[in-house]
Amino acid sequence: MFQVFSKLARRYPTTHFLRLSAHYAEDMPSSAFPAVLAYRRGELISNLVHFVDELDPGSEITIPTVESFLIKYALLKFNRLIV
């Protein structure tokens, strides 16, 4: 999954992607990971915990799959960040 987000980060240079080990996320249970937290001007605007459950059953975690997911939740649009 790291490679998917790494490639998305290159595709969306104005978007900042951060990788955080669950070990350091003390306020979140391990069952919440992987998670996507989106911030706008320092304010949390989206908290998509264990987002892989939201993907279509049987779908692989690929760049198009994750990109479509982020577009669906209005976090990315037309190759640029909305938030």
Image (cartoon, rainbow, N blue to C red):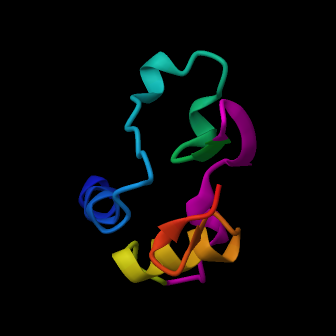
x%, y% of residue 56?
Answer: 60, 83
Residue 37, magenta (yes or no): no
Q: Which residues are magenta?
A: 40-58
x%, y% of residue 78?
Answer: 52, 81
Quarter of the image for the C terminus: give it: bottom right
Above or below, 15 against 70 in this view is: above
Of the pair 9 and 28, the residue shown nearer to us: 9
The image quadrant that residue 71 belongs to is bottom right
Quarter of the image for the N terminus: give it: bottom left
Of the pair 21 and 64, the residue shown nearer to us: 64
What residue is at 47 percent from the left and 83 percent from the top? 59
The image quadrant that residue 23 belongs to is top left
Of the pair 46 and 81, the residue shown nearer to us: 81
Q: Is residue 34 left or right of residue 72?
A: left
x%, y% of residue 5?
Answer: 35, 58
Residue 57, magenta (yes or no): yes
The image quadrant that residue 26 belongs to is top right
Above or below, 28 against 67 in this view is: above
